[in-house]
Structures are given as structure tokens and as C-alpha cells.
Amino acid sequence: MTNQPWAHPLFHAVSGGEWHPGGAAATERLWRACRAALADGGEPAGGRNGGRPLRVVDTGCGEGAAAWRLAADGQTVVALDRTPQPGWRQPPSAAAGLARPFFCTADVRHIPLPDGWADVVLCQCVASLLPRPESFFAEAARVLRPGGALGFSDLMRRGPTASPAACGTARAAGTLPETPAEAVSGGCAAGARSRETWERLLREAGFRLLSFADESRELARLAARLIWYGDGASLHALGLRCASGPTAPGSPASRPGYGVWVAVNARRTA
């Protein structure tokens, strides 16, 4: 996993504790959109949660910055990551003395929660690391109650053709499979899909799409900061630093963008 951005020390300082474009502000926007999605699903005041705190699953939580903030806001938060982090033990000063998230070392494709437990699932820049992200979407639909909200963001491939998502994955044929086997080992951008493919995977898992936002500018801002700090390794892992040329993998048409989706679980209980 050393080719992933968070494996590089400079990335920790540049990203501000949240290992995805946009940082804390992007998480807050996604959280607000998910809460609005619950209302869009026909929830009355107080909703099905009956006035209790919302149950939130933060998948691929990293150091846990978002989980700590949501817990401090009064939500019940289960935060999952495949690798335990030091930030799980010590709350930020703003969260000291308040409710704690429940941190768990787990594979996001096998979430250790019962069916229909969650009101909201957050997944930021995680699915592109999975060889078969559809397995995560199916698991998110399982743990979400009917009408529950999924806030999802990730790298997306752009351009009129299926060009390689990252320098290291270029092939003679010039295309990258929509389900790349090297997604985990080839860096984040190796697992990027087109907007259409991400949305198809969401629908196939039983989600109804509510909104999409192209936040590629946030990815560009992150890239600019990485350039400023000289973190070329993270740039390469994100597919943002390649040889230039009119049709090279580093050209604007083949560099990844960043998309944000909000969807609700359209499945009904039996």
C-alpha cells in the first residue's frame, strides 16, 4: 500500500487530517446533503429515528477527523478502516469530553453491523481502491435502512474515451477495464471510473440517485498544495503527475476528476 497518497508523510500535513479532496469543508457539505436526503425520502420532523441521534457509518475513516466531529455533534458514529490509526485514541481538543465514535478495524466490504442499522453511510475516496467496488455498494445498501442516505465521493475518469486513469496503468490498447484488478496496487486513480459507471454501480446496488456535483476543483487545489510542498509521490498516486503531450496520460482529458454523489437506499423491507 506504499503507493497510496496517505502512505507519504507530506500528504498528512497537506490534507489537513482528512485524506480526500476538499478536506473538512467537503465532508461538512456531504453531511448536510445526506441529512437533506433523509428529508427528501419523506421523513417527517424527527424522522424514523424518533428523535434519537442519527446512526452514521464512516467507511475508510482514516485518522477519524470526520468521525470525531460527527460524534461531537451528537450523532452515533461507527468509523471503519482496514488499518488502525493513532488518531482513534486521542480526540481533537474540540471533541474532548464529548461522545466518542466507535472505531473498528474492518473491511468496508464486510461491515460488522446488522441489516438496516444505519441512517447514513459516508464513503469518501475509498471505493476506487477496491478491485470490485460493487461489493461495497451492496454492503452499504445492506446496513442502511430503507430511505437511508449514502454520501459518496471519489475520483472519476473524464474525457470522451476510456483513457487510462493513471500513468502506471497505460496499455498498448489505450484503455483501462471498468473493473481494474490493479485498483488497490496501482494508486487511487487506477480505480477511478467514469461518472456513468459509478452511477450504474449505485443503481445496481439498489440506490436512487438524488444529486451529483463535480468537485474537480477541489482535486486541483489539493494537487496545487502537493506541488507546493514537493510531494510528487502523492501526485503520482492520484494520477496527477505524468508525462505531458496532446494524448499523453497526463493531459487534461485523461487526468481524473472528482465527483460527489448523494443517493438513498430505495430497497424496501420484505
Image (cartoon, helix red, strand yellow):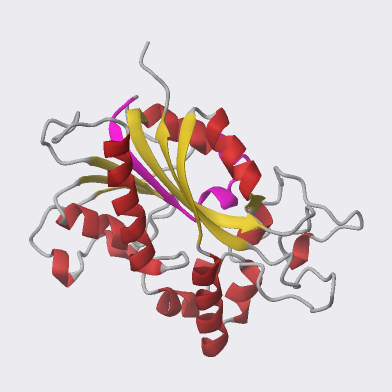
The extreme right residue here reads: 172
Kindly tell me whether residue 64 is visible in this rendering.
no
The extreme top residue here reads: 270
Image x and y of residue 270, in percent: 37, 10
Q: Residue at x 62, y 56 (%)?
A: 156
Q: Is residue 95 left or right of residue 182?
A: left
Kindly tell me whether residue 170 is visible in this rendering.
yes
Count of numbered labels shown in the rendering: 0
Report if residue 130 lies within the magenta region.
yes
Image x and y of residue 188, in percent: 60, 60
Viewer-proximal residue among 248 and 216: 216
Image x and y of residue 104, in percent: 33, 46
| Stretch of the chain drawn in magenta | 116-134
Q: Quadrant of residue 249?
A: bottom right
Image x and y of residue 44, in percent: 18, 31
Q: Is residue 130 left or right of residue 30?
A: right
Quadrant of image for the N terminus: bottom right
Q: Residue at x 76, y 65 (%)?
A: 168
Q: Residue at x 65, y 63 (%)?
A: 256
Q: Is residue 19 above or below residue 183?
A: below
Q: Is residue 268 left or right of residue 176?
A: left
Q: Residue at x 13, y 35 (%)?
A: 46
Q: Quadrant of residue 179?
A: top right
Q: Is residue 44 above or below residue 85?
A: above
Q: Is residue 178 above or below residue 112?
A: below
